[in-house]
Image (cartoon, helix red, strand yellow):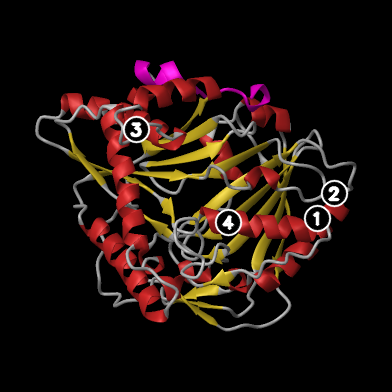
Amino acid sequence: MAMKLDYLGKEVIRPDSLNQTLHLSLFDQFLPSTYVSAIFFYDDQANVQEKILVQRLKKSLSQTLSLFYPLAGRIKEGVTVDCNDEGALFTEARADVLLSDVLRNPSDADLVQKLIVSPDPADPETWPLLHVKVIFFRDRGLAVAVSVSHKICDAASLSTFVCSWTKAARGYADMVNPEFAASVFYPPADISIEFPPLLVHERKSKTKRFVFGPLMIEKLKNRAYCSKRVPQATRIESITALLVRCATRERRSKASAVTEFAITQTMDLRPRVPSFLLPRKAIGNFFFLPLVKETSENKMEIQETVSKLRKTKEELNELITKDTEDSKRSIDEAKERIASAMLSSLLEVSPDTETFVVSSWCRMSFYEADFGWGFPVWVAPDSVDKTHVVLMDAKDGEGVEAWVTLLEADMAALELDAELLVYATPSPSVLMI
């Protein structure tokens, strides 16, 4: 669907006060210079005039940046954030289509890309670390696209920021004081360390949205039952195992030599570690990337993959809880264990390995983003990589939207995969969810 955006204006939004320098963590330093983005669609503005609505968003954004002050700074030399209050970028635009047109074509990746920020990778130090774009549609619908630098925020951090901003927009003060503690948890290291290019690809890719309804998820979870060790597979484990099996099927069947695949499912550390080790509202990249390695010789049966994914979770839990007490020495040792395990996992992947990164945004508070005119009718994530899967709650909280980004040839095969289409519906209208 073609869409044209007329830009109405741009403004730099600044917090109230000047702050200090923030050091990037070990893993922040090597993350790609991309944004983590979410787009919130609203079908009604509660009769609020556009000018008043925009002013409310700008004022509350400035208030929120006083708490999340690093988002108003800039990356310096790839290792620090200069919290110099250069500000976040706020853009207004008007679309020449109806919101209902967008909701009927929710998997139009080109359209979604138009709604978010498109940074210039040539000079990351000039980028705003936070970019907000407000788009007004022809039928009084609107979208609020929020993009934060992946150098200092993960999806959970984005969710925390949006939650705080919406409270400010409704006139409530957020009692949570966010902590930017990534460099404390994962201390900076010698930047001469080289990581494999897990998140860097130059080949053309395509993004497709697949929706798993509650009934199909239950059937898939029952199929994923494999042993007493995993008596009940989670919906994320089950969907991940199915998607990876189907996405690699053609590659495995046509491989002339043994090909290596790596599956890594991002794990948010916040709910897994004691709060004295990591605050629940910590802002940063507090994820762990466990690795499941496969080859083209393996059929990647769903039960087997689920069992392997569960094993990586158990190993991480053991790593966290091993001799962890509320003492400085114990805390330092736990952090060192986790960082060392993460580094070892990353270094196991060779540049020739096909890596599938699966990120779950489920059970986050994205659908609670009420700026004062109601909850969003739809929330869409933006993928950051060429072989990446983002799992997102459907609006009903039970279904799951899988945003799959693959190389074009692989996606052509996945779209026709009979096994996947038993469980997932490709690109249904949001209006029907």
- Tell me whether circle 1 and circle 4 mark residues in contact (CB < 8 Å): no
- Which residue is at a point 21% across and 45% down the rendered structure image? 353
Instruction: Name the image quarter holding residue 321.
Output: bottom left
- Whole-number angstrom distance, CA of label 1 to CA of label 4: 21 Å
- Which residue is at a point 69% across and 73% down the rendered structure image? 66
Label 2 sits on a secondary structure element that is helix
- Whole-number angstrom distance, CA of label 3 to CA of label 4: 26 Å
- Whole-number angstrom distance, CA of label 2 to CA of label 4: 25 Å
The kind of residue tagged 4 is: Leu
Q: Nearer the viewer, residue 263 or 103?
A: 263
Instruction: Name the image quarter holding residue 169.
Output: bottom right
- Whole-number angstrom distance, CA of label 1 to CA of label 2: 6 Å
Picture disc at residue 50: 2
Mark 2 or 4: the one toward you = 4
Who comes first in sequence, dot 2 or dot 3?
2
- Tell me whether circle 1 and circle 2 mark residues in contact (CB < 8 Å): yes
- Tell me whether circle 2 and circle 3 mark residues in contact (CB < 8 Å): no
Q: Is residue 101 left or right of residue 50?
A: left
The kind of residue tagged 1 is: Val
Label 4 sits on a secondary structure element that is helix
Q: Check the picture and name the quadrant holding the C terminus.
A: top right
